[in-house]
Image (cartoon, rainbow, N blue to C red):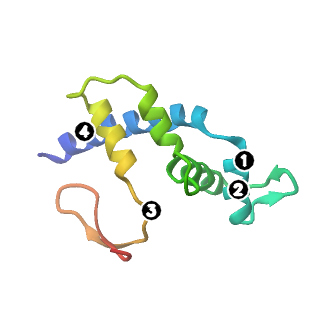
Amino acid sequence: MTREEVLRRYRHLRAIGMRHHSAALKYLARPAIADHAGRLGLMAGQTLIASSEEELTLVFDLAICTAREGRTRAIDRYAKARQLSPESDEIAMLEAMRRARFSIWQIDRPHDTCGLVVEDLLR
């Protein structure tokens, strides 16, 4: 694929992922948000105090993609409620989001066509 084709495909899939992420927010329980924010030191009493959009995004990512033992994840509750075509990019992205795992990456170098080559430091 050319750089332009890669970028076009990436932007298409990224937009789908962002729509899923936004929609999954409706499946969050407020206590889960407060719990994650508290563990990150972002709660003052009952008030979430994020100093950047990135901190807030991390809280929501954790709340959507993780759950206490015996509880379901918001991303899984959202996926169960959706009816998507089995061959669509929408279901492919949603399933990829459900399989995603948090990690720490190190940037190795620019990719020859587009993006970056990274190393997963945890796996």
Local secondary structure at mark 3: loop
How far is disc 3 from disc 1 in space, using C-alphas? Answer: 21 Å
Q: Are marks 1 and 2 in contact (CB under 8 Å)?
A: yes
Residue type, mark 1 in image: Pro
Q: Which of the pair 100/8 is nearer the observer?
A: 100
Mark positioned earlier in the residue sequence (4 or 2):
4
Mark 2 residue element: helix
Taking the image as shown, residue 3 lies to the left or right of residue 35, namely left
Q: Tell me the residue that label 4 is attached to.
A: 9
Give coordinates of residue 92: x percent, y percent: 27, 37
Which of 54/17 is in front? 17
Whole-Å distance between the Cαs marked 2 and 3?
A: 18 Å
Residue 30, horizontal then vertical, whole percent: 71, 42
Numbered tag placed on residue 35 in the rendering: 2
Identified at 33% across, 41% down, the residue is: 95
Tell me if label 4 and label 2 are in contact, CB under 8 Å: no
Q: x, y percentage for residue 104?
A: 43, 71
Disc 1 target residue? 31
Question: Which secondary structure, mark 1?
Answer: helix
Real-space Cα distance between discs 4 and 2?
36 Å
Q: Indicate the amino acid at tag 2.
A: Asp
Type of the residue with mark 3: Phe
The residue carrying pointer 4 sits among few (fewer than 14), some (14 to 19) or many (20 or more) residues within 10 Å by Cα, namely few
Mark pair 1, 2: CA separation: 6 Å
The earlier-in-sequence mark between 1 and 4 is 4
